[in-house]
Image (cartoon, rainbow, N blue to C red):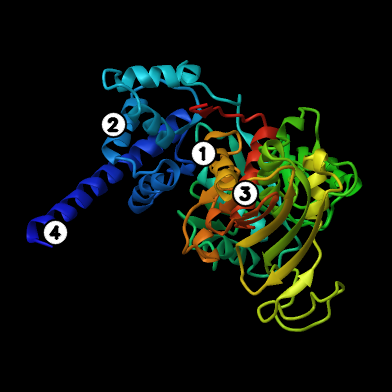
């Protein structure tokens, strides 16, 4: 390679890097001032680094076959920033890809005015005022939800994390809770500043004042004494799973609704956002966001069942170990789970196959399921062995799922990868409920085997946030449609 070629590559990189750096404040301004969430083929650009933005442009190769030109996306972002738009989610990558296919005589401004006509109505808030949120429990999911809520504080997201509730505090508890929010062995450092107010027992994270409340029962708290009213309580403990138990939250002053982040018992609606969230009504006071596995598999099953039909199948979950297991061999009430989680693969049960029927009743009785806990701390996989309604091919099946990940109402739930080098740690922090590993798909006539990755912590937490937004009336349009 000659010196000129070397300099050319470096200069091109510097030019792209400069534009990516200039995009960061525009993305932040649009979110804080207008409530506009900017995405790039489903990837949020809010709080993204320069390299994250460049990678998002490169990700276009998987979605549309070629890398997106950042000069086009930057020009379009500037044009969007000049418009007076209502809060919404705008996929900049999809807009650019569509625009680049149009005749050159169509101006970018005219294109945007047509594509964004629904929200070209001036700035307006999707909610009349802030919606108080309480996290009851502060474990793996609770802390990730806290991060996501804090990160999303802005004009377009009126949900405010007002309090976390944990069991009786011991000396140094507040500092330890703050430290666990600040540093995470799997998901890395918190993106911002965290300080503690020990006198008032609170954590202040990126300007969000979060009261830490100690309680042993959901019905023993007066939230109004902390200025919290009509709160959405998100129960992350998994202790109370039926209507009677979760209903205890509603007996505390200042609460309005409850969401469980685990499979529910009884007749409580199990919501997989993107699939059956239309079942949520304003009168629902207790809901469940199902399980991480259910959220990962149901969107994929929905696409396949609607397109090809599913006669029967077996779901095997290869699941990262959880806090419910032991670090070293010790007593556990469940079979096998007492054995050391970091040292063993552990066969256990999963209710995911039965839970599918709650979101997709048409698949009731057609699926079986089991699970293997494996020695990794995060990111799991669903292995789906399906007997389809008709013969198909790898190309057709993968094509259906690729299209669903890009241009369907399930694009937030279904991710898609073509990489032949991908491993579990590459997917830490992924926001989709599940990611189809297309390189591993096997098809033989009407029998198909699919591999669907999912970050059982972050991917699931993003699904929970989507259910929370729906419950509070925070429904942003996704554009382009």
Question: Which residue corresponds to the image point at 77% horizontal and 72% vertical from the top-left?
Answer: 347
Q: Quadrant of residue 361?
A: top right
Q: Which residue is mark 3?
A: 433
Label drawn at residue 6 = 4
**Separation of disc 3 and disc 4 at Cα?**
41 Å
What element does badge 2 sit on?
Answer: helix
Q: Secondary structure at mark 3?
A: loop
Per the model, the C-alpha gap separating discs 1 and 3 is 14 Å
Q: Mark 1 highlights which residue?
A: 406
Neighbor class of circle 1 (other Cα within 10 Å; few <14, some 14-19, many 20+) is: some
Residue 468 picture location, percent across and down? 67, 39
- Earlier sequence position, callout 2 versus callout 3: 2
**Sooner in the amino-acid sequence: mark 3 or mark 4:** 4
Most extreme residue toward the bottom is: 329
Whether residue 34 is situated above or below residue 327 in the rendered picture? above
Q: Earlier in the sequence, mark 2 or mark 4?
A: 4
Give the residue at mark 2.
75
Q: Nearer the viewer, residue 157 or 429?
A: 429
């Amino acid at each position: 390679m000659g010196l000129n070629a070397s300099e050319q590559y470096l200069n091109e990189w510097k030019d792209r890097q400069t534009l990516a750096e200039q995009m960061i404040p525009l993305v932040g301004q649009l979110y804080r001032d207008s409530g506009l969430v900017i995405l790039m083929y489903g990837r949020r650009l809010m709080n993204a680094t320069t390299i994250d933005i460049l990678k998002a442009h490169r990700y276009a190769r998987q979605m549309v076959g070629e890398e997106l030109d950042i000069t086009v996306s930057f020009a379009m972002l500037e044009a969007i920033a000049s418009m007076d738009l209502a809060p919404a989610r705008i996929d900049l990558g999809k807009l650019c890809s569509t625009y680049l296919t149009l005749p050159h005589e169509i101006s970018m401004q005219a294109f945007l005015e047509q594509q964004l006509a629904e929200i070209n109505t001036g700035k307006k808030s999707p909610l009349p005022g802030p919606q108080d949120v309480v996290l009851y429990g502060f474990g793996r999911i609770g802390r990730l939800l806290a991060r996501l809520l804090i990160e999303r504080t802005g004009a377009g997201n009126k949900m405010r994390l007002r309090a976390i509730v944990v069991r009786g505090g011991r000396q140094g508890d507040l500092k330890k809770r703050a430290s666990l929010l600040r540093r995470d062995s799997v998901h890395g450092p918190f993106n911002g500043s965290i300080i503690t107010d020990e006198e008032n027992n609170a954590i202040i994270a990126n300007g969000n004042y979060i009261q830490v409340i100690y309680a042993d029962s959901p019905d023993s708290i007066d939230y109004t004494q902390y200025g919290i009213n009509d709160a959405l309580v998100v129960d992350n403990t998994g202790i109370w799973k039926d209507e009677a138990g979760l209903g205890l939250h509603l007996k505390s002053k200042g609460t309005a609704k409850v969401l469980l982040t685990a499979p529910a018992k009884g007749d409580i609606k199990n919501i997989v956002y993107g699939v059956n969230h239309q079942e949520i009504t304003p009168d629902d006071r207790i809901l469940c966001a199902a399980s991480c596995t259910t959220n990962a598999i149901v969107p994929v099953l929905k696409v396949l069942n609607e397109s090809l039909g599913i006669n029967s199948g077996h779901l095997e979950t290869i699941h990262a170990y959880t806090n419910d297991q032991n670090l070293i061999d010790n007593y556990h009430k469940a079979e096998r789970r007492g054995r050391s989680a970091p040292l063993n693969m552990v066969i256990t049960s999963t209710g995911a196959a039965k839970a599918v029927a709650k979101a997709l009743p048409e698949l009731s009785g057609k699926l079986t399921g089991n699970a293997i806990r494996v020695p990794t701390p995060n990111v799991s996989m669903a292995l789906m062995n399906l007997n389809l309604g008709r013969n198909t091919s790898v190309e057709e099946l993968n094509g259906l799922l690729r299209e669903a990940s890009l241009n369907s109402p399930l694009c937030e739930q279904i991710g898609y990868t073509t990489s032949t080098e991908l491993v579990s740690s590459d997917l830490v922090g992924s926001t989709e409920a599940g990611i189809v590993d297309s390189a591993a798909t096997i098809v033989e006539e009407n029998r198909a085997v699919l591999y669907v990755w999912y970050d059982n912590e972050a991917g699931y937490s993003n699904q929970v946030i989507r259910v929370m937004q729906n419950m509070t009336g925070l429904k942003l349009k996704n554009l382009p449609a």
